[in-house]
Image (cartoon, rainbow, N blue to C red):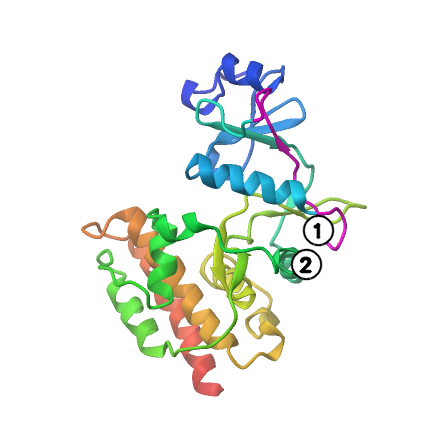
Amino acid sequence: MTELPSNTVPPPSVLDAFGVEGTPVPLDGGRGRSVRVGGFVFKPADGTEEEVEWAASVFERLAPGGGFRVPAPLRAADGQSVVEGWTACEFLDGEPGPRGRWSDVISAGRAFHAALRKLPRPGFLARRTHPWAVADRVAWGEEETEVAAGLAGPLSALLELRRPVEQASQLVHGDLTGNVLFAAGEEPAVIDFSPYWRPPLFAEAVVVADGLLWFDPPPGLLVGGGGHPDWRQMLVCALIFRLVAHSELVGPSGQARADEAARYVRATGVVRHRLADA
């Protein structure tokens, strides 16, 4: 077996703290940072310990059933969710969507968001500065930013298409596309919670935007939104969200690859035509 880089494997002290034994095995997805050890998944903690602890407490309170399942967080012997920068949860078997399961991914997201509807907004959301948090605020007109060369054109076009919408916000998972697992005889598993305070329809639009950018989605997917009048505006915001996040990762003074810039030009053109037909 190929030895894994030390920075992608939880050290023995972390496994001991969580009471887990076994050999780490790398997992697909998770930006290449997740490993399976026995019946658990370990990965470096995303965000602050406050955010990780909050997410663990949310998943612990979600009742089973209702159209989705979530992995149970694993706590160390002292009750902490983060040990030496590592977090862990139950391993759930299943194949990730979305190919062939677009509508199932969206349905699982709707069930998940229904279960979150009454939860309050956590304070850390306003303090986050990572690329996706910046992109979220730009998408909703709460912040402005410069983008990498090659992306200014499609961003300008999307900003021209954007119009104000009034919808109630709540906790949503802002990255459902590759984070819903499907296993025979089991409800879909929602993993890697990426919390945002936005309308649930926006989370659905992010899934569709991902389809436009990186997949070959079925023709009916773009319609989406259950016929909601704000659906196309949600698509505009979702594309801005993905574009700005990509730019933040490249760096505002950097250069987006031509093929990546072309994705946003193409997707923006599709949404513009949809708006023109509305």
Magenta region, main secondary structure: loop
Identify residue type, mark 2.
Ala
Q: Which residue occupies 39% across, 68% down?
A: 266
Q: Which residue occupies 48% across, 16% down?
A: 11
Give neighbour class at mark 2: few <14, some 14-19, many 20+ (Cα, 10 Å). Answer: some
From the image, tell me which residue sits under label 1. Answer: 68
Identify residue type, mark 1.
Phe
Q: Real-space Cα distance between discs 1 and 2?
A: 7 Å
Q: Nearer the viewer, residue 27 or 172?
A: 172
Image-based side of 178 in relation to 8, left or right:
right
Question: Which quadrant of the view contains residue 56?
Answer: top right
**Farthest residue, direction right:** 185
Q: Nearer the viewer, residue 46 or 180?
A: 46
Image-based side of 75 in relation to 47, left or right:
right
Q: Which of 153 and 171 is in front in this view?
A: 171
* Boundaries of the magenta span: 63-79
Q: Is residue 53 magenta?
A: no
Q: Where is residue 92 in the image (x, y as percent from the top left)?
A: 68, 36
Q: Nearer the viewer, residue 88 or 209?
A: 88
Above or below, comparing residue 90 to residue 150 in the picture: above
- Is residue 263 at least partly visible in the picture? no
- Is residue 197 at least partly visible in the picture? yes
Q: Where is residue 248 in the image (x, y as percent from the top left)?
A: 29, 51
Above or below, comparing residue 3 to residue 43 in the picture: above
Q: Is mark 1 on a helix, strand or loop?
A: loop
The quarter in which the N terminus is drawn is: top right
Is the Cβ of the residue at disc 1 closer than 8 Å to that at disc 2? yes
Give the number of the disc on residue 10: none
Q: Is mark 2 on a helix, strand or loop?
A: helix
From the image, tell me which residue sits under label 2. Answer: 111
Above or below, comparing residue 182 to residue 138 in the picture: above
Question: Which quadrant of the view contains residue 153?
Answer: bottom left
